[in-house]
Amino acid sequence: LVADLGEFGLIARLAHAVGAAASPALTPGLKRGIGDDAAVWAPTPGTWSVITTDALIEDVHFRLSTTDWYDLGWKSLAVNLSDVAAMGAQPRYAVVSVGLAGDLPLAAIDAFYQGMADLAARHDTLLVGGDTVRAPCLAITVTVVGETRPASPGEAPPLLERSAGRVGDALAVTGALGASAGGLRLLEAPEGSADRVRGGDEGSALLQAHRRPVPRVEEAAILVAHGLRCGMDLSDGLLSDAERLAEASDLGVVVEAARVPLPAALVAVFGDEALAMGIAGGEDYELLCAGPPAALATAAAALTARGGPALTVVGRLVPAPGDGSRVRVVDAAGASLDLRHGWTHFATTDNGLAPNGDRVG
Amino acid sequence: LVADLGEFGLIARLAHAVGAAASPALTPGLKRGIGDDAAVWAPTPGTWSVITTDALIEDVHFRLSTTDWYDLGWKSLAVNLSDVAAMGAQPRYAVVSVGLAGDLPLAAIDAFYQGMADLAARHDTLLVGGDTVRAPCLAITVTVVGETRPASPGEAPPLLERSAGRVGDALAVTGALGASAGGLRLLEAPEGSADRVRGGDEGSALLQAHRRPVPRVEEAAILVAHGLRCGMDLSDGLLSDAERLAEASDLGVVVEAARVPLPAALVAVFGDEALAMGIAGGEDYELLCAGPPAALATAAAALTARGGPALTVVGRLVPAPGDGSRVRVVDAAGASLDLRHGWTHFATTDNGLAPNGDRVG
C-alpha cells in the first residue's frame, strides 16, 4: 500500500518510472532531475530554469476552521517560492490549480487569489494562469518556475543543492525555528486547553508564522552571491531535512541543540518544549545551508547589513557514519540527544496536520 | 457563489486579482498572460517558454470504475501536452501533483506514473518532479513547460494564439471529432442499456479515444511551420472552443455542420446522434486552427505526407455579429442549426463527467 511506503518512497518510485531518461547525463538541457527542492533545465546555455510543485489538501495540510482564504492563497504560493529560493533561483512565474465545491462564496476565491497575488508581487513573481475545477475536497496545487543566471558570462548558473555538502562544512539556518510548529499546536488545541490559555499575546506571532510564512527568496540570493552552493528549505523540520541533505551529500550531520535559534515567542509560550519544536517542527520555510565557515560568516554579515534574518551555525557536516543514522543531535557536552523526527505524510498516525513538502521538485 | 459564475467567470476573476502586473505590456519578459491555452515568457530573447496546468478530479473528470491507473496517468499528461501544442510550442518538462488515499495499492501508483512516463517519452517530454500527498479525494494536477524558437535568428518565436484570427480565415480541425464524447457515453451507460448493446466492437475505438487521447504535438509544429498562427486545442467541444477563439479574436465564426469530420466508429455506433457529439462533445484534444485557405491547404498536405491526421476546413471567420452570439452552425443550405453547447464545469447540472479544461494557461 502507498501508506506503507511513505512519501520519500513514493518519490523514489516516481524517479524509477521516469528512469534513465530523466538523468541529466543522458538528457540534453536537463541539469538536475528528481531529488532536490526543484528540477533544473537550461532553455539556453546562459540561463537555467527551475520548476517545483506543491499540493495543499484540506484537513491534511490546513483546516478552513483555522485558516482564512487570503492566508491559504498566501501559503500555497509561499511553500513553492521557498522551494525555488532553496535552489538558489529567483521565482518568476506561478500557475495555480484549485479544486473546490461549487457552493463556495465568491468572496472566498477572491481572497484566495488576492493572497497569492500579494505575496507574488512581494517577490517579483507573476501569477500567469491556472485551472479551477469542481471537486469533492478542497485541493490546491501551485507550480512555480524560476531562473538562475551566472554572475559572469560563461560560468554555469549557480544553484543551492542538497548534494553539494562537504565534510568540514558548517551547517547553518536563517531566522529561528519552531514558530510554525508552535502556531500549529495552538491552532489544533481544544478551546479552553492549557495551550490555548498560555498562547495569549505571544501566540499570535506563532499563528502568523504558521499561516503566512515568508519565503526566503532574497536571502537565498545573498547566500548564493557569497559563494554558498549547498542548501534546501526547512519544510519537514530540521531533523528530517538535515537527513535529506546528509543523504544527498552522502555524509553525516551533527546538530548542536544548544545552537538552534528559537523564537522568543515560542520559548515564552512553550518553555522547555520549545527546543523539540525548533528541532523537529516543520513548515518554518527557513533556509538550511552548508559551507565553509568563512563564507557563512560573510553571508551572515551581508544578511544583517540589509536588515535580514540571522544566519546561525547549528552544526557541521561529518563523514557518513557506518550505522545508517546520518543525523546526530548533541547537547552542549557533546552527548547524543534523542528527539522525535519530522512527520511523514503517509506512514504515521495522523496527529494534527502534515507539513507541506518540498522534496520532489 | 462559485457555481453561479462558471469556470470562464473564475478565469476572469483570477485575471482581475493578478491585475495589470501580469500584462505583457507592463512586465518585461512576459509575452502572453492569462487567457490562452498557456502563458508565455521569454527566459532569453531567442527562446520563449510556455506553461500550462490542468487538474483532474475523481468523479468529476474521471471514474476509477471505468478508467485504469495507467490510462489515468496518460490522460493527465495528455491534456497538458495538448495545451502546450495548442500554443505552437514543444513540451519539454512536466511535474505532477497527486493527492490520494494512503490505502491505495502500490501497483496503482506505479501504473499511473508509467502511463505518464510512456506518453512523455513519445513526445520528448521529461517528467522531472512532483508531489504526492494524502487526500480524501483523488486529485491530480499536471503542469507542463514547453518552448518555442524562431525558424530564423532575430525573429520572434512563433505561437498559435486564439486571438490571431482574421476575417476571411478558414477554420479547420485536425482528425475527426466526437470520438471521446462517444466513448464517455458508452462508459457512463448502464449495464444492458441500448448504448451498451450497440457499442459492440466499434465502441472500443471510442473508449480508447476517451481514455487515452493523443495530443497533437507534432501536428501543431507542422501548422506553425506552415505559417499558421491562430489555434487552440479542442477540450470543451467545437462549439464552446470556437466561441473562445471568436471572443479572443473579436470576430464571429460560422461552422458548416456537414463539413465536421466524424469518426466512422462514432457514426457506426450512434448514427444520427454522431453529428451533435462531433460538434458539441469535448475532450477530443484535436487542434482547432484558423488561417488563410492556401496556408491550411499546404499544411494539410504536409500532414498527409507524413502519415498524420487530416486537416479539414469546417468553417470560416466572419465579422463579429451584433447580437452577441459569436458562433453560428449552419447546414449545407446555409440555414442556422441549434445544438447544445459544451459543458461548463460549475454552472450546469452534472450529467456524467466534465471535460478537462484548457483555458487558463
Image: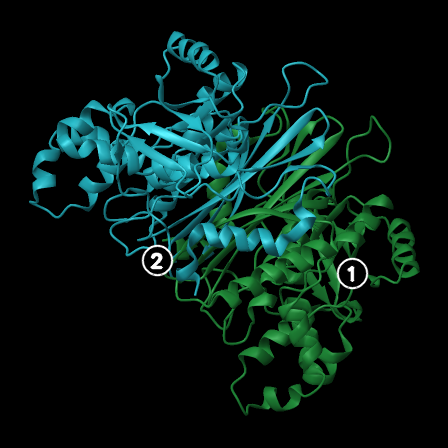
Chain colours: A cyan, B green
Front-most of residues A357 and A102: A357
* Residue under the image location 43 percent in, 37 percent down: A321
* Residue under the image location 33 percent in, 52 percent down: A60
Q: Where residue A129 sits: x, y (%)?
A: 54, 42
Q: Which label was assigned to residue A103?
A: 2
Classify B254 as above or below B126.
below
Q: Quadrant of residue B165?
A: top right
Q: CB atoms at circles 1 and 2 under 8 Å apart?
A: no
- Residue B231 in view in this figure: yes
In the image, are marks 1 and 2 on the same chain?
A: no
Type of residue at label 1? Answer: Thr
Front-most of residues B111 and B225: B111
Q: Where residue B107 sits: x, y (%)?
A: 52, 67
Q: Quadrant of residue A35?
A: top right
Front-most of residues A45 and B91: A45
* Residue under the image location 46 percent in, 20 percent down: A218
Residue linked to disc 1: B174
Q: Is residue B330 left or right of residue A137?
A: right
Type of residue at label 2? Answer: Asp
How many tags in the picture?
2
| Circle 2 SS class | loop
Local crowd at mark 2 within 10 Å, few (<14), some, or many (≥20)?
few
Of all chains, the one bearing label 2 is A
Q: Where residue B320 sits: x, y (%)?
A: 68, 48
Of all chains, the one bearing label 1 is B
